[in-house]
Image (cartoon, rainbow, N blue to C red):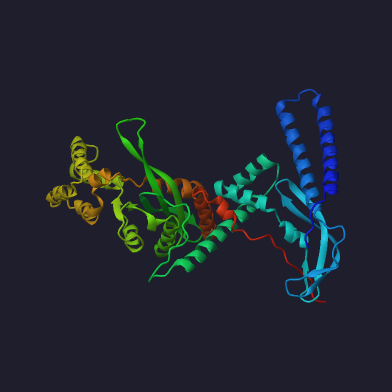
Amino acid sequence: MHCTPTVKGIEALGERIAEQVKGITRRIGEEAGKEGRTLEWLEQQVIVGLKGVGQMLLEGLCEQYVDAYPAAEIRCGCGGMAEYQRQRAGQTKTLLGEIVIRRPYYLCKTCGHGRFPLDEQLGFSAGGISKGLSELLALMGAEFVFEEAAMMLEKLTLLHVSPNACRKEAEALGRLIADDEEKRLTSAWDAAAPPTPVVNDPIPGDFYVSMDGVMVHLHGQGWKNQWLGAIYTTKSAVSGKRPEVLEIRTIRPSFYADLGDTKAFGRHLWLEAQRRGIDQAQRVIVIGDGAHWIWCLADEHFPGAIQILDWYHASTYIWKAAHALYGEGSDFAKHWAKQHLDLLWDGHVATVIAHLEAEVVRKPALQDIITYFRNNQQRMRYDIYRASGFQIGSGTIESGCKHVIAARLKQAGMIWAPDGARFVAKLRTRLKSRRWDETIALRPAPHRTYVRKAA
């Protein structure tokens, strides 16, 4: 049962809208002549008037789909027949405000469920909100503190919503993302022979994987790591400050985030890498800060990848050794650090280790630094990496931790429910990965079930 607007109905609606616009113009014109009227005042009056016109137009267009002569009965989903009862009004909140529509109501005596064919046709959810408003609430909630999101939405649309409405829609969409990810992983994961999922947004050339964690505060659990993974490629560009230097810049990043153990996180990051076409990559590079769990996941899910220890973290250990040997801030420490940073930059890791081992008897604190360099020696061939045009810094994932996770989940005083932190983080990763439209498509059609209570 589907009714469509008629030419006559649309023309009649147009005449009503024209009269509405005339009335608004007349009212604003009469008020505009009073003292103190400014451009700001005129802007506000026009916006309010246009919103009212839009609300009237939206409601009128929906009414065009209401059949003037409803069918006596329609087929119910249970297999029975639902009989026409009467016209019933339903209201929903939209981007243009609340609209009310009277539409045919049917009741199935077999299952007791009521049906509104127009609701199913238009995606109208009586007592709820429109999909357009739902998307905007989720988007604002992903980007801003919920109180700020509600305030900004009201400023932009003149629509009053509660902070809780922003939270609800953001978390609901984040939950859909989590469910979709689990479903995809379940269908794709097979430890014996993992099939390759459908590749979209493929990465040409070098394929980078990077991982890290950022601490977020959870109710009842304290500070926990929100794991973040980044998939991206790079391009070379001339430095603006030093034209003789080529900079290796990140392009086309996508992210995956989750709470919990790193084992599940690693499998989902593998799935994201498959989505980006890792099996078609020329070279795969995993960059990390030296944490053991990162290299474990790299060995398990990205075997054969070139593993690179982030240059910044490697250099901090050189400085730790210099300070241990000669005292923090001393000229001797600065000279020793520069000498050994140059050695490290040119790939002479073995020489750096030998120099440290020669001093370990005098300074036992150097042992941890020696162990760090030994464990990561094969990941510190910076001369080869630079010659190959590889990125040697983990700035992409470090930046991701800040702008994807911390900027939203780690503001002053924030303590999150675990599900809230998880779902909002997932929503932000989709947004920052340029996958918003794909994510919005996950939403089911609005649905409200009406069941007549038994006598």
Extreme front residue here? 7
Residue 307: percent from the left, percent from the top? 29, 54
444 displayed left or right of 390: right
Q: Is residue 12 above or below residue 191?
A: above
- Identify the residue shown where x is 18% and y is 44%: 325
Say which quarter of the image contains residue 305. bottom left
> In the figure, is residue 242 to the left or right of 175?
left
- Residue shown at 48%/55% (left/top)? 200
x and y, in percent, of residue 438 in the image: 56, 54
Residue 118 visible in this rendered orientation of the protein: yes
Q: Is residue 412 visible?
A: no
Question: What residue is at 47 percent from the left and 50 percent from the top?
Answer: 405
Q: Position of residue 112 (x, y in %)?
A: 78, 73
- Looking at the image, which is closer to me, 373 or 366? 373
| Side of 390 where 26 appears, left or right | right
x then y, percent, for residue 165? 65, 53
